[in-house]
Image (cartoon, grey):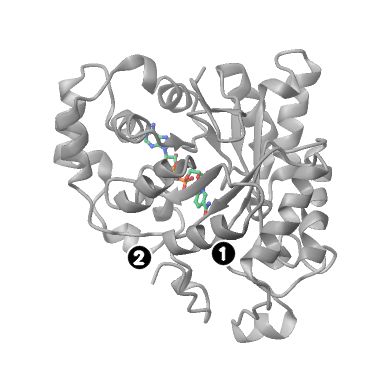
Amino acid sequence: MSSLVTLNNGLKMPLVGLGCWKIDKKVCANQIYEAIKLGYRLFDGACDYGNEKEVGEGIRKAISEGLVTRKDIFVVSKLWNNFHHPDHVELALKKTLNDMGLDYLDLYYIHFPIAFKYVPFEEKYPPGFYTGADDEKKGHITEAHVPIIDTYRALEKCVDEGLIKSIGVSNFQGSLIQDLLRGCRIKPVALQIEHHPYLTQEHLVEFCKLHDIQVVAYSSFGPQSFIEMDLQLARTTPTLFENDVIKKVSQNHPGSTTSQVLLRWATQRGIAVIPKSSKKERLLGNLEIEKKFTLTEQELKDISALNANIRFNDPWTWLDGKFPTFA
Ligand code: NAD
């Protein structure tokens, strides 16, 4: 099992978890159940991934068989863009809880600092980039007039009500987090960001450390996840698995793989990881990184020097949106 980090609200979170994006609904419940058997205790889900019923089913099966208790599992979800209005935050959260068949989440992130027009569940769920039939025809997204602090305060209410244990933010940049810290009552415990050797985000990571906000890396393997999405930038960016520096570091630690080096580099920087895989061997390999080897300071530096500020997940490219989240 993964080691635990203590969050700024005292809750303990596994340093290595399983990402649930793109896990096919047909196999998802079983994969979550099998992952629990392998030792996974954190599941990083989201309304937007469209598989929350199945993630919940897998977790509940493991609990009902006595493999784990609810307290042993760290369940994560994310509030999608269409539900930022305070009237819809708790509604969306309760939909997630109901789909999963759980009473509370350990961590609930704001998925993006972007507010879309509300879409009722019966019209389309999860809505994705949908903000109405007319918009869909035009390839357009209509935004909602909701500042992030209003969304955040609605989430603080959900903590008070015991529906979530902690609040996180995802895809937020420094100045927005700084502003949030000035206005919040309950501090965010975590920031989830795209993070890999092509995008190391040193200042953001340091800022979070200074403020006791746990950084969680997504897409730790860089372009890999976005090749599946057929993203041109991912197809034309050299894979990190074949990178000379990563290969050399892996060779320095016999028995390690390049994928494990990528994850270990992050966890040794104090950053939690949530790699997604459906293969048993990889799931085990990704989970056991901490036990297997430790990178030297020089190796950590050499990997960090690969930074090229290449970002694969950028809302600037969403339909006609032009959202300057990272501009
Ligand atoms: P990832 O970096 O985990 O890569 C997944 C890909 O790598 C898959 O194709 C998988 O088969 C492959 N892979 C996994 N283990 C491997 C190994 N040991 N060797 C070789 N290949 C391996 O990418 P991801 O899914 O984008 O990110 C992980 C999780 O982060 C997601 O599942 C999701 O939960 C979360 N996420 C969050 C956001 C956000 O906006 N907050 C965005 C993207 C992902």
Give the answer, above or below, for where 294 lies relative to 248: above
Q: Position of residue 63 (x, y in %)?
A: 76, 20
Say whether residue 218 is visible: no
Q: Position of residue 56 (x, y in %)?
A: 74, 35
The amino acid marked with disc number 2 is Gln
Give the answer, above or below, for where 210 lies relative to 67: below
Q: Name which quarter of the figure residue 64 lies in.
A: top right
Instruction: Answer with left or right where residue 275 lies relative to residue 253.
Output: right
> Residue at point 20% right, 19% down?
253
The amino acid marked with disc number 1 is Pro
Instruction: Identify residue for label 1.
Output: 113
Per the model, the C-alpha gap separating discs 1 and 2 is 25 Å
> Residue at point 58% right, 68% down?
114
Total residue callouts = 2
Mark 2: C-beta under 8 Å from nearest atom of ligand 1: no
Instruction: Answer with left or right where residue 87 lies relative to residue 204.
Output: right
> Residue at point 32% right, 58% down?
235
> Residue at point 79% right, 63% down?
88
Q: The residue tagged with tag 2: helix, strand or loop?
A: helix
Q: The residue tagged with tag 1: helix, strand or loop?
A: loop
Q: Earlier in the sequence, mark 1 or mark 2?
A: 1
Q: Position of residue 302 (x, y in %)?
A: 15, 39
Say whether residue 79 is visible: yes
Residue 232's label in the rendered image is 2
Query: 10 Å neighbourhood of mark 2: few (<14), some, or many (≥20)?
Result: few
Instruction: Answer with left or right where residue 112 lies relative to residue 15.
Output: right
Quarter that holds the C terminus: bottom left
Instruction: Answer with left or right where residue 72 lies relative to residue 192.
Output: right
